[in-house]
Amino acid sequence: MVERLSWKKMVWELLLIYLPWVVLGLIFDTVPMSWFLLVGTWLQLAWHFHHQLKMSNWLWKERSLTPPSGSGSWEPLFNGIYRLQQRNRRRRKELATIIRRFRNGAESLPDAVVVFRSEGNIVWCNKLAQHLLGFRWPDDAGQPISNLLRSPDFVRYLAKQEFEQPLEITAPFNYDRTLELRIMRYTEGEFLMVVRDVSQVKQLEGMRRNFFANVSHELRTPMTVLQGYLEMSKDPEILAGPMWGKAHGVMTEQLVRMNSLVEQLLTLSKIEAAPNIELEEVVNVPAMLEILEKEAVSLSGDRGHQFTFDVDDNLHVFGDDDQLRSAISNLVYNAVKHTPDDAAINVRWYQSSEGPRLEVTDSGDGIELQHIHRLTERFYRVDKARSRETGGSGLGLAIVKHALSHHDSQLEITSEVGEGSTFAFTLPSRLVSHAA
């Protein structure tokens, strides 16, 4: 262990330096003592000057971590500085580790993070902040944050310094996105701003509101009809008269419509709430289509539709029988409901190059391009009046979409106005059951 510098050691060092010169002065009494002391002082100054140069070179020029060799009182000084340097290096390393961990943690967050001073100058931001807010790091270091986020709501929010409630603004470079900002005190004189993309949450809230509004609207009409006829049935003369037969038929029709709507809602909820299913059940799609062909002919009645079912009888697949039945039946029933009388409806089930494929093609009126991307939305209908006449609820294609998503597939819609439409999907090749 290195001995620390003490006043006793410095006194002994001075005695060892000057004592020889004092002895020489006593021996040579012809020479004044002051000359000997002056020579000793000059030698001591030269010795200190030499060690000062060594320390300066070590601190400013040399890159060696090892201190230079020293003697006397300089040795503990060199070693003390060396120990301080080691301590500072450890502290800098620990501080760098803490900063690196903070930044890595901030980069791993699903939110944008910005640190800025109380006067508004940016200190640091993570990569997601650069993506959501358009910041550039480190180019924007020191820039006032209000110059980069120029939303008037944000400027007022920042000026008030009241950050108890979050603020919602539109993303600077994508007006379809909604951002939620939360600002909190970070350190003395600094604030931490966390920015989250809440566009999907807002969209889901809107979908939920629309869903309840649509369900209420769809159920209001049949319930109003039923209520009206039930009030009329209080009169015994109406019950005995010829009008009751018509009223009974209308009520039955409205009850069937409500029952169909509730069943489709339950089916859609069941499919949406289902976890990732194990696609291990063998589904006999040809047998399913054979049944659906008979049901389609019955549903068509006397409308004169010309059906063609081209089915590969050996093409069975792995999947969920109920969900595939819901998807395929909705496509076939929609073709019957929305295809004009005496028109052709073709259903094809075959092995394509990508995998098992189902195509339902009609020769109806077709669908305009602006409607196609919205057909799988709940309650969306191109012609609402016609859909109600045919008993459509606007939920069929939503059921198809979610059922196919559980089978790693998606609905493909192609249509030309006046030519007809094709609704198709392709299942992955890995779902083919070769046992059939």
Image: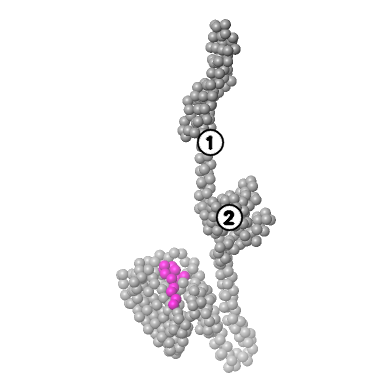
- Residue 88: which numbered mark, if any? 1
The residue that appears at 59% across and 92% down in the rendered structure is 243
Q: Nearer the viewer, residue 208 or 182?
A: 182
| Spot occupied by residue 140 in the image (x, y as percentages of width and height) | 57, 53
| Spot occupied by residue 355 in the image (x, y as percentages of width and height) | 36, 71
- Residue 294: which numbered mark, if any? none
| Spot occupied by residue 10 in the image (x, y as percentages of width and height) | 57, 19
Give the amino acid at mark 1: Asn
Residue lying farthest to the right in this orientation: 160
Give the amino acid at mark 2: Val
Q: In terms of image quadrants, where is residue 21? A: top right
Tell whether 189 sits left or right of 278.
right
Q: Nearer the viewer, mark 1 or mark 2?
A: 1
Q: Secondary structure at mark 2?
A: strand
Q: Earlier in the sequence, mark 1 or mark 2?
A: 1
Q: Nearer the viewer, residue 237 or 132?
A: 132
| Spot occupied by residue 37 in the image (x, y as percentages of width and height) | 58, 14
The residue that appears at 54% across and 6% down in the rendered structure is 27
Neighbour class for label 1 at 10 Å: few (<14), some, many (≥20)? few
Quadrant of the image containing the C terminus: bottom left
Neighbour class for label 2 at 10 Å: few (<14), some, many (≥20)? many
Query: Which residue is denoted by mark 2 in the rendering?
Result: 194
Q: Is residue 219 magenta?
A: no
Q: Is residue 407 magenta?
A: yes
Which span of residues is magenta-colored? 402-414
The residue that appears at 52% across and 21% down in the rendered structure is 47
Residue lying farthest to the left in this orientation: 435
Q: Secondary structure at mark 1?
A: helix
